[in-house]
Amino acid sequence: MDVIAKQRDMIAEALKAAVDRCAAEGLLQVGPVQEVHLEAPRSKEHGHLATNLALVLGSQAGLPPRKVAELLVDKLDLAKAAVERAEIAGPGFINFHLRQDWWGRLLAEIVALGPRYGCKRVDSPKKIQLEFVSANPTGPMNVVNARAAAVGDCLARLLAAVGEDVSKEFYVNDAGSQADQFARSLEARFRQLLGEKAEIPADGYPGEYVLEVAKELFDEHPELAAMSPEERLEFFRRQGLDRMVEWQRRDLEAFGVTFDVWFRERDLHEAGKVEGVVRELQQGGHIYEKDGALWFRSTAYGDDKDRVLVRSDGQPTYLAADIAYHRNKYERGFDRVIDIWGPDHHGYIARMKAAVQALGRSEEDLEVIILQLVNLLRGGQQVRMSKRTGTFIGMAELVEEVGRDAARFFFLMRSPESHLDFDLDLAQEQTADNPVYYVQYAHARICSILRQAEEKSIELPKPEDVDAALLASDHEEELLKCLAAFPGEVENAALRREPHRIAHYAQELASLFHSFYTHCRVIGEEEELQAARLTLVRAVQIVLANALELLGVSAPQIM
RNA sequence: GCGCCUAUAGCUCAGCGGAUAGAGCACCGGCCUCCGGAGCCGGGAGCGCAGGUUCGAUUCCUGCUAGGCGCACCA
């Protein structure tokens, strides 16, 4: 447990004991308290930790909250905690001020833990499967896929940081009618390469990239020319899609995103898992036949309408395969499945949750995060994308244009359910206006200070030996408070599935550091103070690096 | 028509039911004999509307208005 959580715990226990004592003495007509809410107040006048306990108990006990607060403070035994004083404020908050020397323990812990500061172990780790991107292998990935990649990867890092056992997975839709259409489009392109006249099918894929794939495959497999069209089509269906998947994997790697598992839809079909799950649902009484098709009674679990699983032509729908896929996820032992989908899939949530329940799992075992749209801006104007005119900006183009760090940071600045305006100009600016540079600059600046210390042969002080009470200015205290808040921010971001909190945290910490830097010198101060500030700066460096690591953004030593 | 998301400063967005609602951009004005000026300091302006729950609502609930997206025996 981190040092701030320890203080939190001790104060909470002391408060509970005080409530019990008041109740025992008949001063308060309330039952035992289950949970004490302690938060870090915004304003420094309100101390380091504050509780609303008296306000909550006030209505229960029928007493004015301030009166309750007085009773509690009177009975409060804070001998174990590093609390300097507790005071009652406002409508009945109890504010706790920590002793100045306590910050020394915080700094010592940060330096000792290094990259692990901010991580924790949840009480009962869950096996979590996180599925994201899962872009169709029939075309290049778009910017929403890129956003999903950034959010999913960051969320995986966050979940791992709080001790969950998380696996990242990409679902490849390499079966069904779109696979056929893609193969036929490749065949058409192939014939064009042979000099024949061939039209791309009306429901096919007209993009230039299909021609590139055809070229690549032809170069590597000259024997294709001699095959029958049927043989070639079968070859394209597999090799063509595999080639696209390889492109996707490369683009994602360039973005710093890797997956533990690439799951093939066609494996489900080939192993008979799709019919299998339909049969399972049938046995469970969740299926009926209408108009020659098999329908899943998803309305039994709150969906708007029932859904077709097997079409009247005998072909399973995408949903049927996806249900089989989710069945497989749970069979692999995952306690919890988190899917990140694009905004066009929101209507899908109800039916998938229905399916999960029909398979005997509870609704909470499937979490769905819907990402909202991304608007690219250039010169203040929305970039109008058209594949036809070649103005398409996909994931690869975006990463190439603005760089991996900026792209990731920008995607992680906004909450997932919020529509995102992505300013391409700003992302490339190397000024303080660009938040990613602003944060990275803070890290580089600290590295520079530490380099100078080394050049001047100033020995890095042992954190345990520094006098943290010397860090008494507002700038220093704000920094310390921010450092102490980091583990809580990580936990909160992970629990709420909101990576953007870390991006905001990083900006705030960087801002506090820059402010500190212009007002306080480190090197050249009197020895004790220099030692304390060097330690503070090291701690900031560690936490900035840890926050950036969670975001998947580099923490440069020089820029 | 139904569903999902959104509505906070001129713009882009934060905000864990709490105390005086915060950043950045833009605009105006300051700060480099000194650790990286890719920086810092100061200035004005805001919770779409109406109810409800609560000791307390920007936060939760309902209705309305506006914008975005989606509503297949496609994937």
Image (cartoon, coloured by chain):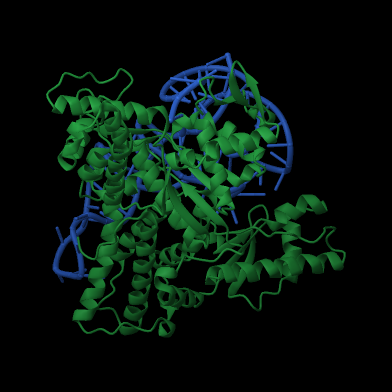
Chain colours: A green, B blue
Residue B63 is drawn in which quadrant?
top right
Q: Is residue A383 visible?
A: no
- At 25% across and 65% down in the image, what residue appears? A445
Relative to the observer, which residue lies in front, A487 or A202? A202
- At 61% across and 71% down in the image, what residue appears? A85
Q: Is residue A121 left or right of residue A227?
A: right
Q: Is residue A210 visible?
A: yes
A197 up-or-down from A441: above or below? above
Q: Residue A471: x, y in percent?
A: 41, 73
- At 32% across and 35% down in the image, what residue appears? A142
Q: Is residue A468 left or right of residue A526?
A: right
- At 31% across and 29% down in the image, what residue appears? A182
Q: Residue A110: x, y in percent?
A: 43, 72
Q: Quadrant of the C terminus of chain A?
A: bottom left
Q: Residue A304: x, y in percent?
A: 62, 24
Residue A425 is drawn in which quadrant?
top left
Q: Residue A19: x, y in percent?
A: 77, 65
Relative to the observer, which residue lies in front, A499 or B75? B75
A466 up-or-down from A84: above or below? below
B74 up-or-down from A88: above or below? above
Q: Is residue A352 left or right of residue A167?
A: right
